[in-house]
Image (cartoon, rainbow, N blue to C red):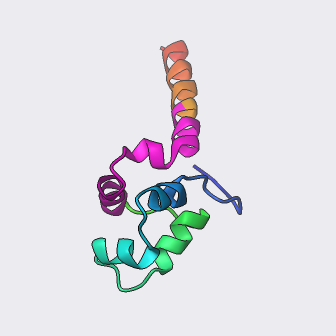
Amino acid sequence: MEQGNRPIPNRLLMHRKLMQYTQAQVARLLDLHDTNPITEWEKGITIPNTANLAKLSAIYRTYPNELYQEYYAEVRRRIQQKEQALFVCE
């Protein structure tokens, strides 16, 4: 999905605060050397890879689609549009 310069909406900061973790603590749990990736993820600059997204969902005790609820909804909407077009063509 093309985001351009728009931030990727997410709820990482909210979930981290709910768990009362600092970025440094989350970085340690993810075996990261520093907090830069976490800052970029929370600001929506980048998105974690699949492995880190799975780990974040385990750390925050939620599902990956809850961490990226708006992004997931947009992806789902676009897939549904493509599915509809696929069935119309057949």
Rendered location of residue 1, percent (x, y): 57, 49
Give the residue at x 55% y 64%. 42
Number of marks in the rendered image: 0
Q: Residue furthest right?
A: 5
Q: Quadrant of residue 29?
A: bottom left
Give the residue at x 32% y 59%. 59
Q: Quadrant of residue 30?
A: bottom left
Q: Is residue 71 left or right of residue 37?
A: right
Is residue 66 inside the magenta stretch?
Answer: yes
Q: Is residue 54 left or right of residue 1?
A: left
Rendered location of residue 72, percent (x, y): 51, 41
Give the residue at x 59% y 38%. 74
Rendered location of residue 82, percent (x, y): 54, 28
Rendered location of residue 33, percent (x, y): 35, 86
The relative height of residue 16 versus residue 36 in the rendered view (above or below) is above
Q: Residue furthest bottom?
A: 33
Q: Is residue 17 left or right of residue 81?
A: left
Query: Which of the pair 53/62 is nearer the observer?
Result: 62
The relative height of residue 56 versus residue 64 in the rendered view (above or below) is below
Query: Which of the pair 18/78 is nearer the observer?
Result: 18
Q: Is residue 79 left or right of residue 25?
A: right
Is residue 21 inside the magenta stretch?
Answer: no
Question: What's the magenta bit mostly, secondary-structure-wise?
Answer: helix
Range of magenta residues: 50-76
